[in-house]
Amino acid sequence: MIYNNLNLIDLNDYPVQWWEKLLSRAHDIIADPAKYSKACEGKIMGTLFYEPSTRTQMSFQTAMLRLGGTIIGFDNPATSSVAKGENIKDTTKIVSGYADVVVMRHPVAGSVKAAALTTECPIINAGDGGHLHPTQTLTDLLTLKEEKGHLDNMTIGFCGDLKNGRTVHSLIKAMSCFKNNKFVLISTPELTLPTYIKDMLCAGGHDFIEETDLDKAIDGLDVLYMTRIQRERFASIEDYEKQKGNYILDNKKMSHAKDDLVVLHPLPRVDEIAIEVDDDPRAMYFKQAKYGMFIRMALILTVLENTDKPAPLIVGSEHIHTKCSNPNCITHQETYLPHYFHGDGTTLVCEYCDERTLVE
C-alpha cells in the first residue's frame, strides 16, 4: 500500500466514525464560530480550480478566512502555467511546497488522487470530473444530520443526471453506510447511475429501485436530491438538448410529498427546481450551501492537525501494460502516471477513477 499525508480523495476511504467526528466538530463551529476564529492563524491554503466553481471554491476560501488563515491559488487555469502545458504533477508539487493544505477541482476523473501521489502537503478533492465530490457529500451529511436529526432509516430519491453526477455518486456511497437507507434512482435511461455504483449497492444488499417518473416516486421520499443536467458533461449540444428539462420540481409535485421531506441540490440549478419552490420550508438547498462552509472549516482543521491515521492512497499494484477502460480517466491525459489497479482474475479496478477494466 502507498500512504501520503492525511488526504481526502474519497470519503469512503475513512470509517464512518471519522465522518461523525467531522460532523460533530462542524456542529460545534455552528454553535460558537468565534471560538475558532484564530485556529488556522499562520496557515496557508492553496486552491487549484481547473474548473468553474462558485459555492465550493468560495466556501473553502471563506472557511479558511474564518479560521484565521490565508489563501493562494487560481480559479482559472488560463491564468496559470497550466495554459503553457504544465502537467498536474508539476503544478501541485510546486503549490504544495508553498501551502499547508491544497484544495483541488479538476474536470478529469482521478485527477486529485494523481496529484496526491507527489504533493508535499495534504490535498482535498473538491470534485474530479463526474467521479467524486467528497466535501459536497460532507455538506449533504451535515445538512441531513442537522435538519433530520439522523442519517439512517430513510428513503432517498436522486433525480436528474445520475450518470455524470459526482455528488450523487459520493452521497449514495456514503448513505449506504448507514442502516436501512433505501434509494430511488430517478433518471432517463441515458443518464442512469454508473454500473460500478449499482454493483456496490447490490454487493452490500442495499435496497434500490430505478424510476423514470418523478411524479410516481416523490410521495414515498424522505429526502429528494435534485441535480441539474450537466451540459459540460455531454459530447454534443444535441445530446444535451435531448435530456434537459425532463425533470422539473415545482409546487404541484411538492404538494404530493411528505410534510417533512428535505429537498437538497448541490447547485447551481438551471431549470430543474422552479423558483416557486424556494419559499417552501422543505427546500433546504440554500441552507445546505451555508452548511458547506461549516463542514469545510471542520475538515481543514482536522487535516491540518494531522493526528488521524491517513487512508491508503494506493491499495493495488502497478500493471504496466494495462490501460484503464475509462476514456475520461486521468491516466489517458497524464501519461507519465503509473497504471495502478486492484483486483484479480479477468477484471481490474482503476485506482484513480474506480472503473472496471477487463484484462485480455
Image: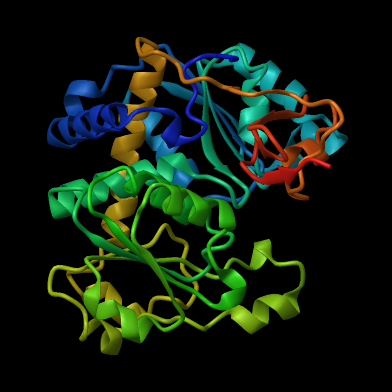
Q: Nearer the viewer, residue 69 or 47?
A: 47
Foreground pick, 58 / 50: 50
Identify which residue is drawn at 45% across, 29% down: 13
Q: How is the image coloured?
A: rainbow
Residue 119 image point, x, y percent: 63, 17
In percent of the image, x 29 and y 37: which residue is there? Answer: 294
**Where's residue 49, x and y in %?**
61, 40
Check the image and report above or below for 146 versus 116.
Answer: below
Locate residue 261 relative to residue 131 in the image: left or right: left
Quadrant holding the C terminus? top right
Residue drawn 78% across and 26% down?
Answer: 319
Using the image as rendered, state which of residue 182 and residue 20 is in the foreground.
Answer: 182
Q: Residue at x 57, y 62 (%)?
A: 163
* Position of 216 relative to 278 (above/below): below
Q: Position of residue 21 (x, y in %)?
A: 24, 27
- On the picture, is 77 further left or further right than 228? right
